[in-house]
Image (cartoon, grey):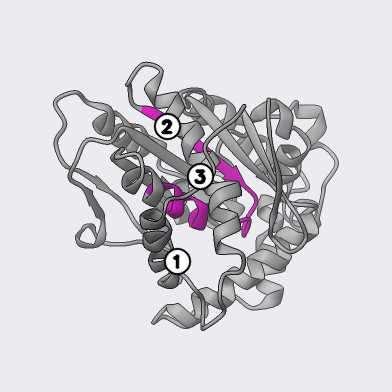
């Protein structure tokens, strides 16, 4: 597939200005023009071509392990689709639909203690998510509120801080670490992958329940995606390194200093390990387009399936 990959001067100027706001603590984003021409524009052009086939709303999933760059890519795609193609674009993360802390406390007492920790299927408010998507797709559109989740305090923001979508979107980009994940055969859950599973889920109750939620509550949602883009890290080891970098950024940009230590993060990503590794293995099955990342976080190639 050949998609446009050369930016005009006006777009390039706006793109550089946009990226300037995203640069972290004076660290410049390298090869801005190359990324624009070889990555962001072709990707935006592909999404635009999907919309132009029938001029109907398209919901694109963007998935990848923690720290792979989903949020950044989503924001830049939103920017280009609006500025270059004139497509009203709405972006949000599955992370913003985490259940409240009080709801997860109830789950941890009623089902399994590990459900106190946000992340795995079962800890998202799928009803709220489905209702939100339905409102965004309505023909007689009315402004829609998108919830926000504050990871620094591990709880949902109050409604006053939710994002209001004022215009009907042509493109919806729905990103998240487990977006597009498929449930696994129960016999594959038996052998523990890490200390969380072996020490705190010896009876498999948590693993089986997560798998059940994935099949019962998430399958229909993920099947409603028009296309899925997957960001593939070189290995799970890089998920830890990149998640650690994420936390450093959060610590510097958040007013709340209640962020995680290196050991906390190592334990935290164990909750995500099973599904993340399965998605990394099945990338060619679950995705329509996979973007391969190298150890320096750079995209090396894009492959359609």
Q: Vertically, is 30 above or below 27? A: above
Q: Earlier in the sequence, mark 3 or mark 2?
A: 3
Q: Nearer the viewer, residue 302 or 200?
A: 302
Q: Secondary structure at mark 1?
A: helix
Asked if one can make out residue 296 in the rendered structure from this viewpoint, the answer is: yes
Residue 111 % position (x, y): 55, 44
Which residue in the structure is indicated by mark 3? 41
Q: Quadrant of residue 290?
A: top right
Dot 3, how many residues are within 10 Å of its Cα: few (below 14), some (14-19), or many (20+)? Answer: many
**Residue found at the very far top of the displayed protein:** 54
Q: Vertically, is 257 above or below 187? A: below
Q: Secondary structure at mark 2?
A: helix
Which residue in the structure is indicated by mark 1? 19
The quadrant of the rendering that contains the C terminus is top right
Which span is picked out in magenta?
58-78
Which residue in the structure is indicated by mark 2? 48
The reply to whether the C-beta atoms of the residues labelled 3 and 2 are less than 8 Å apart is no
Q: Nearer the viewer, residue 277 or 118?
A: 277
Residue 209 % position (x, y): 61, 36
Q: Nearer the viewer, residue 60 or 252?
A: 60
Residue 2 % position (x, y): 59, 30
Asked if one can make out residue 122 in the rendered structure from this viewpoint, the answer is: no
Left or right: 210 with respect to 295?
left
* Residue at 37 percent of width and 38 percent of height: 129
* Residue at 34 percent of width and 57 percent of height: 148
């Amino acid at each position: 597939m050949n998609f446009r990959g050369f930016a005009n001067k006006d777009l390039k100027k706006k793109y550089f200005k946009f990226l300037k706001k995203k640069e972290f603590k004076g660290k410049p984003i390298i090869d801005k023009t190359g990324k624009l021409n070889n990555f962001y524009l072709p990707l935006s052009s592909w999404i635009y071509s999907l919309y132009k086939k029938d001029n109907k709303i398209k919901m694109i999933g963007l998935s990848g392990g923690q720290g792979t760059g989903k949020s950044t890519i989503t924001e830049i795609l939103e920017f280009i689709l609006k500025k270059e193609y004139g497509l009203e674009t709405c972006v949000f993360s599955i992370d913003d639909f985490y259940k409240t802390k009080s709801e997860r406390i109830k789950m941890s007492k009623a089902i399994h203690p590990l459900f106190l920790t946000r992340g795995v299927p079962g800890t998202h408010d799928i009803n709220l998510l489905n209702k939100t998507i339905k409102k965004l797709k309505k023909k007689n559109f009315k402004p829609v509120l998108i919830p926000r989740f504050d990871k620094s305090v591990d709880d949902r923001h109050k409604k006053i801080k939710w994002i209001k979508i004022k215009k009907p979107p042509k493109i919806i980009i729905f990103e998240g670490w487990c977006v597009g994940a498929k449930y696994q055969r129960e016999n594959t859950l038996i052998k523990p992958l890490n200390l969380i599973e072996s020490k705190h889920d010896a009876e498999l109750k948590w693993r089986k329940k997560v798998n059940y939620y994935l099949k019962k509550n998430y399958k229909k949602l993920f099947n409603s995606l028009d296309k899925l883009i997957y960001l593939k890290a070189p290995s799970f080891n890089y998920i830890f390194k990149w998640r650690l970098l994420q936390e450093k950024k959060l610590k510097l940009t958040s007013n709340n200093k209640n962020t995680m230590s290196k050991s906390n993060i190592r334990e935290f990503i164990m909750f995500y390990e099973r599904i993340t590794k399965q998605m990394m293995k099945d990338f060619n099955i679950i995705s329509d387009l996979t973007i391969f990342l190298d150890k320096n976080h750079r995209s090396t190639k894009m492959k359609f399936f």
